[in-house]
Image: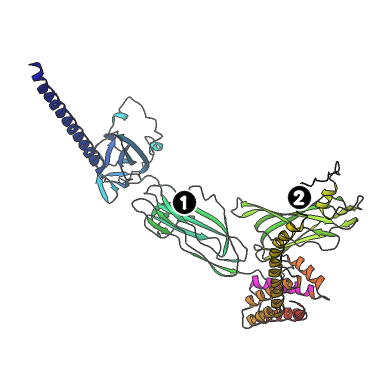
Amino acid sequence: MTRAAAPHRERFFWSVYSACVVARAVLLATLFVAGAATRAFAQSQPVLELSTATPTVGLGDAFDVTLIAQDTEIPSFPELALPPGMAASRPSIASSRNISITNGARTDRLGIEVHWTLRAAQTGTFVVGPATVHVGDRVWTTRRLTIRVERDTPQRAPGRGPQRPSIFDPFGIFGGGGADPFADGLAQQIAEPQSDPAYELEAPFGAGVFLVAKADRASAVVGEQVTQTVLLYANARLQDPQFSDLHEAPAPQFLRQSLLDDAQPPKLLALARVGGELYRVYQLRKVALFPLTPGALRIGAMRLVMQGPRGGERASKPLDVRVVAAPLKGRPAGYAAGSVGEFTLRAEVGPRSIEEGGTFVVTATLDGQGQPPPRVLLPEGPRFEWLEPDVKDHFEANEAGRWAGRRTFTWGVRAKVAGAQPIGKMEVSCYDARLRTYAKLTADLGRVDVAPRTGPAPAADPVRRGLAELPEALGEVAEPQVLPMARRLDSWVFAVPIAVTLLLPMGALCTFLLRLVVAATVRARRKKPRFAKTLRDLQGEAKGATPVAVEALSARLVQEFASAVLKTPVRGLRDDDLGALLTERLSGNDGAQLLGLVRDARDGQFSGLTGPDEAQARFRAVVAIISKYAGKVP
């Protein structure tokens, strides 16, 4: 009996267990669907609450009405409907963010808290509201509030004495007496923030938020600072502006230096009225732009994308600046185009006593504001050898918004002649755009005392000098022993195959090298001089070219000629060094004349003020000097 009933009990047990599992699954699914529906319903409607702490107020008393709005998107444009006989101040708005986690699901709610300060001009019962906010493309409405206005309030009942004004009550400064700001019986607003006239505009350039670009000058000389400021105007009724994808204003014909830290958030400058409405003015950028070439130059538009319900791309208007070259009248020798500003020059030399062949250091510092000169004219002479300078800049924006700092040149100078040797003077020139005149700065370097060399002259080759200082060998090297197998190699049986094996590849290699030498010799004899063709090509290009192009061809022709004469590229070589090399190789005063023509051609190229006749005459003068040596140059 027991054995027969066991299968029935087992089947009954499994049936009950299966029913429990199914019921549990159905219950969990029901709870999940209910939770999802609750979350969806909660997310579909924003949280709106309109409240006041004083539903009963006295006649003329100020009271606060608060609106709290939360949703997955930031609410905006809050408005409060008022009945006749009641006035409200401009709202004060604060933003908030609430994060909640329910059943493992995270919900982010963005909200605003808006405060209005109201005052009634007559007694009675008033219905305030509803308040409305915009969330996305929809408008949501709150409930209404009932406010009772009495002639005497509990706060001012007899026997309690006067109340102390609250620091949060903007009307508390009037106390219980004196002039009432609502004495005219109408809705007089609370005093608004002052508008800065410097930033006021007649009309906005966009809806809610727009960009305005300004330049402190409409004309400048090459190298003079043009300060560009980009402002962001945002309607005061909106939240703080949020933007992304910012593109700087392009200015390819200017050297750009930022006067602010671009990584910092925009700075609030002022409040200003635009078309009758109050706007917040933020400073996005303030940069110093130095024009590189003369002409009508354009500063492009800055672009960014605004976030939020009224998002979209915003762009400033481009700016045009008329740029001219520094005047030729009064321009000193050695002036570099674009050196504009106000600077001072000071120099230091040390040590003052050295040995013949030794080196001392000369440091020149240019202090001031603007675009510093790129080079300094050094004293010439055979007594000293000036090495390449080390140039360092330290510039930043000063309190006046100008690009200011110092540029430091450091040279190593080698003394060649013993005795008390005067170094000479260094010179540098710049153009003062404020005074419209050139400034020539000089610094007297004094002299150095060079003592005759007392020790032996240093070895020309430092490697050989190091080898000579090595110690001698400590012992004799033993003669290697010859193995018995090696003696067999002396036999002709082994010598002939080995010789043939070694000589065949060497003979083939020698034949191949000989053919290469013969072919190179034939090509060299057939090849015509390259510089003669370069000279003809540049003369052809100069015909009918613009003055600026002709000046560039003059400088290029001298560089090609110097490269052919010196048999090495000279591009990047300083003009003074190039003139010294040409003077050594050319006869008479031809090298110095070419150097002077190159400097004049470069000044004309960068200034753009040279006439066509003057440029062609300078090019012909260069060709006349070079033609003397054209037949001797490969």
Q: Is residue 481 above or below residue 438?
A: above
Badge 1 element: strand
Report x, y in % for residue 212. 46, 58
Image location (x, y in percent) of residue 141: 24, 45
- Residue 179: image quadrant is top left
Mark with earlier residue (2, 1): 1
Is residue 550 visible in the rendered structure shown here?
A: yes
Q: Residue at x 26, y 48 (%)?
A: 139
Span highlighted in magenta in the image: 591-612
The circle drawn on residue 486 is 2
Q: Position of residue 584 (x, y in %)?
A: 82, 70
Give the number of the disc on residue 133.
none
Residue at (63, 73) in percent of width and height: 608
Per the picture, the main secondary structure of the magenta-coloured stretch is helix
Between label 2 and label 1, give the one nearer the viewer: 2
Query: In which image quadrant can residue 345 be found?
Result: bottom right
Asked whether 492 or 457 is in front, the reply is 492
- Report the front residue among 192 and 520: 520
**How far apart are the two marked residues, 2 and 1, measured between alpha carbons?**
94 Å
SS for dot 2: helix
The residue to which callout 1 is attached is 282
Proximity of marks 2 and 1: CB atoms separated by less than 8 Å: no
